[in-house]
Amino acid sequence: MDSPVPALADRAAAAADRLLAADSVLLASHIDADGLTSAAVGATALERAGIAFEVTFKKQLDAAEIETIANAGFETVLFTDFGSGQLEHIVQHEREGAFTPVIADHHQPADADTEYHVNPLLEGIDGGGELSGAGTTYVLARAMAECGSDGSQATDGVDIRPASSPAGPPADPSHDHATAGNRDLAALAVVGAVGDMQTVDGELIGANAAIAAEGVAAGVLDTATDLAMYGTQTRPLPKLLEYASDVRIPGITNSQSGSIRFLEGLDVDLRRDGDWRTWADLRHEERQAVVSGLVQHAVSRGVPPDRINQLVGSSYTLTREEPGTVLRDASEFSTLLNATARYERADVGLAVCLGDRAQAFAEAERLLRRHRRNLSEGLDWVASSGVTRETNVQWFHAEDRIRETIVGIVAGMALGADGVDPDRPIVGFAYKTDAEDETKVSARGTPRLTGRGLDLADVMDEASSRVGGEGGGHAVAAGATVPRGKESAFLEVVDELVGVQVGGSGGDG
Ligand code: C5P
Ligand code: C5P
Ligand code: ZN
């Protein structure tokens, strides 16, 4: 059996068999980039297998939403990018005969279990850093192609497209060797992993890396060592440097004039036909010149060597997408998807994942502009009003100034901003829009902190349940819902628990 993640092969095969035996499937997924790409991978695999299905997206999979799903009248429900953490509720419906659940998820599983359950954490693989929801669904999709192959899809990769073959989707997918074994879906799986910020030291690792390698072999993906800044396909060069805040370079980061001055000092043409060029427009030698220039500049301004190393990382290029578009780069693609799903337009993001480059793509780009504006306004607000420091964490409460669906993204970005301690977990609050008596919580840490023992999933789960809410997620990024008015009580528990985990002064551990 040939599986991109051998440890999950048996689970994936069992789940695939069950799906292939279904008359109709309801695919339920999460509303973020990883959830959307998970849904697209699952939907494509079902479609290719000739199984009727519908797709539904949920902001949060709680008891009420599972009830709605149970009442939808499908014999089989495929949960992607969530479901493991809600198994207690799910198996209740399974026992009552409402539906058979099939789960492809990478979140911390609840105590209950079910027969068709694909999750890296069940096999000792880190679901926070080594495999995304879309990657897990990809493992399932690969197994579906293997089990379901009637000969037409049984080529098993012997005849895959070389990486050097021309870009652009083939006119007739049935004659496309990359679709053999569903390997072309590796590109979407990588977008999901990058969207969930699963890169470690600038690159995908473990099972994610194995999937990326399959994408490269299938000719849908290219990986390279490149400048690790967001916007390499679409941002004008000065903006690329000005806005990159992961590594702060004095005189360049946050400075438009500084960025332009720096670029003008290099032997690189900055404009073509009057327009700024983008990173994607540069030739290899030009890129090299900019990177060396940046490193020299950073060294001269005293940026520490370990930060300077972070200027370079792995890029993941979707070779079949048009160069210079957001879809060409996994990171930009994932932001486009967040811009749809987090604004109740998951349908638009899914259509783009499934290949719509006309109406849905245009709408997604419009939504992206709004999303960018919201993120920058949210970040400005956090910067100007500041965060409050407790013993072990720092926090802000945006009330209704930041949408609850993006408060987590803002919290994560704020960790790199002025006035925010980059080495202390951050907790962001925002009012829930659909429940007046509830507050959304998003917590973000860093790999350095999780290395010291921080587990925000645990913290969110425990602290929220103590004040009558619920929460979970990953060690480095987690969230919760708490009753409005309980924020302070909740925060007190969070501060104490984090202290115990990282051995700060707030705990006794
Ligand atoms: O529900 P899901 O697991 O897909 O969400 C993961 C969330 O955690 C994403 O919003 C992602 O941006 C965030 N994350 C983060 N930093 C990390 C890892 C994940 O902000 N290092
Ligand atoms: O919403 P946010 O981006 O902060 O979510 C971060 C992580 O925490 C995601 O993986 C999400 O699925 C998880 N989460 C959760 N329970 C909640 C809120 C978020 O498990 N109530
Ligand atoms: Zn995910």
Image: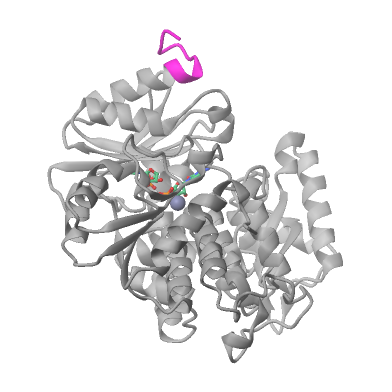
Residue 111 visible in the shown view = yes
Magenta residue check for 103: no
Q: Residue furthest left?
A: 437
Magenta residue check for 501: yes
Give the percent coordinates (x, y) of residue 325.
Answer: 59, 75
> From the viewer's perspective, is 312 left or right of 50?
right
> From the viewer's perspective, is 228 left or right of 63?
right
**Residue 417, placed above or below residue 209:** above
Q: Nearer the viewer, residue 149 or 236?
A: 149
The quadrant in which the N terminus is found is bottom right
Residue 29 visible in the shown view = no
Identify which residue is drawn at 56% across, 52% down. Answer: 9
Give the percent coordinates (x, y) of residue 451.
Answer: 58, 27
Identify which residue is drawn at 42% across, 42% down. Answer: 383
The rendered magenta stretch, by its main secondary structure, is classed as loop
Q: Residue furthest top?
A: 508
**Residue 434, placed above or below residue 161:** above
The quadrant in which the C terminus is found is top left
Rendering quadrant holding ligand 2: top left
Give the percent coordinates (x, y) of residue 215.
Answer: 66, 66
Q: Nearer the viewer, residue 11 or 416?
A: 11
Q: Quadrant of residue 396?
A: top left
**Residue 448, placed above or below residue 353:** above
User: Which residue range is magenta in the image?
Assistant: 500-509
Identify which residue is drawn at 70% across, 54% down. Answer: 314
